[in-house]
């Protein structure tokens, strides 16, 4: 009877691995349609925001000059 128990353990492992393998290799393309549609909407929104920003100038676009700070060291 102990030998039968030791043979059932690998049998259950094989059955479990077969169930997991069939679940892992299932067809996952059902959710891709919604995700691709969402990505298309995101891409369109980003293109619209870039085209509107190209025609609008920011108010604070002034040229500023930077004066270098010099330090003199006397020895």
Image: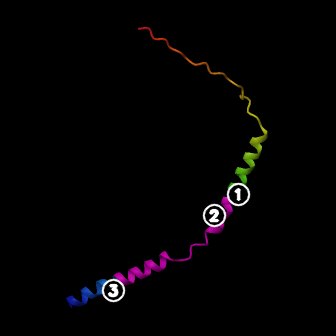
Sort mark 3 into few (<14), some (14-19) or many (20+) by Cα contacts within 10 Å: few
The way the protein has been coloured in the rendering is: rainbow
With 44 as the anchor, is 10 left or right in this view?
left
The residue positioned 27% from the left and 88% from the top of the image is 7
**Secondary structure character of the magenta stretch overall:** helix
Residue 11 located left or right of residue 53: left
| Tag 2 residue | 35
Task: Identify the residue shown where x is 48% and y is 80%.
Answer: 22
Determine the residue positioned at 21% across, 91% down.
1
Mark 2 Cα-neighbour bin, 10 Å: few <14, some 14–19, many ≥20: few
Residue at label 1?
A: 41
First in sequence: mark 2 vs mark 3: 3
Q: Which residue is mark 3?
A: 11
Relative depth, front residue between 72 and 41: 72
Mark 2 and mark 3: Cα distance apart in space: 40 Å
Circle 1 residues within 10 Å: few <14, some 14–19, many ≥20: few
- Picture residue at 34% right of the left edge, 83% below the top: 12
Q: Earlier in the sequence, mark 3 or mark 1?
A: 3
Could you say where residue 51 lies in the image, as x and y percent from the top left? 76, 46
Q: Which residues are magenta?
A: 13-41
């Amino acid at each position: 009877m102990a030998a039968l128990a030791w043979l059932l353990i690998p049998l259950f492992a094989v059955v479990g691995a077969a169930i997991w393998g069939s679940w892992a290799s299932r067809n996952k393309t059902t959710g891709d349609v919604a995700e691709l549609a969402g990505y298309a909407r995101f891409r369109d929104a980003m293109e619209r925001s870039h085209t509107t920003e190209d025609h609008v100038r920011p108010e604070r676009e002034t040229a500023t000059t930077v004066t270098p700070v010099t330090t003199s060291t006397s020895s």
